[in-house]
Image (cartoon, rainbow, N blue to C red):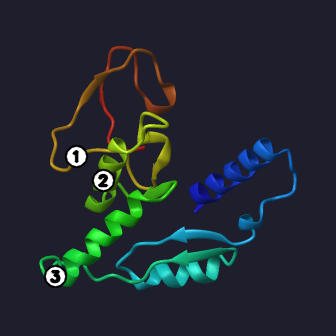
Amino acid sequence: MIYVEHFFDLKEVEHSLETGNTSPPAWSQRRRVFLASDDAAVFHEAKYQYSRYDFIGRLRNGSYIYNRTSSQGVFDMTLDLYLLIATDFLVCTYNSNICRLSYEVLLTKSPTNGDAAFQVQSVDEMYCTQFIHKRWWRAIADFEREGVKLGNQVSIEST
């Protein structure tokens, strides 16, 4: 939720700069977040740990392996995808196929920024395609903390 907090804090500052009003906007009292998950514990945790937020969404069973090909499962996943790409800021796990697909669609819809990279934050790993070969990079400097020396071959697997 740290990324969601940061997004809303930036929106409050943006509002203050645009209006010249230093008091927080009315919408900042109850922040609205669309939550898509097939894990009931996520909804329970969100509701009780983040009381300042209104969570919109419901438990969906479309991602369960046995429900994916049913009419309801396809509808649920399509609805989640549609709502995820309609958000102002997307926080998700790039380990999720729906998250990566949402990011890809956002790339086609982002004329204001030119790139959706600033509209998405992953909480688990950097963007990648599943089942790809490792990409190797040559270090252009020494990075003592990571134990990398100039010229070493390195593979970056996560952020």
Q: CA distance from mark 2 to mark 3?
A: 22 Å
Return the x and y of residue 152 as percentages of the image width and height.
Answer: 32, 20
Q: Quadrant of the C terminus?
A: top left
Return the x and y of residue 40 as percentages of the image width and height.
Answer: 42, 85
Residue under the image location 20 percent in, 50 percent down: 130
Residue sitting nearer the eye, 143 or 86: 86
Q: Amino acid at mark 3?
A: Ser
Q: Residues within 10 Å of mark 3 (few under 14, many from 20)?
A: few
Q: Are marks 2 and 1 in contact (CB under 8 Å)?
A: yes
Quadrant for residue 33, please give it. bottom right
Residue sitting nearer the eye, 40 or 11: 11
In the picture of the structure, the residue carrying the numbered disc 3 is 71
Q: Are marks 1 and 3 in contact (CB under 8 Å)?
A: no
Mark 2 or mark 1, whichever is nearer to me: 2
Residue under the image location 23 percent in, 32 percent down: 135
Residue under the image location 45 percent in, 32 percent down: 146
Q: Amino acid at mark 2?
A: Arg
Q: Are marks 2 and 3 in contact (CB under 8 Å)?
A: no
In the picture of the structure, the residue carrying the numbered disc 2 is 100
- Residue 102 is labelled as none
Q: CA distance from mark 1 to mark 3?
A: 27 Å
Return the x and y of residue 96 as percentages of the image width and height.
Answer: 30, 61
Along the horizontal axis of the image, is 31 left or right of 146? Answer: right
Q: Amino acid at mark 1?
A: Thr
Mark 1 or mark 3, whichever is nearer to me: 3
Residue sitting nearer the eye, 103 or 75: 75
Return the x and y of residue 47 as percentages of the image width and height.
Answer: 59, 82
In the picture of the structure, the residue carrying the numbered disc 1 is 129
Quadrant for residue 31, please give it. bottom right
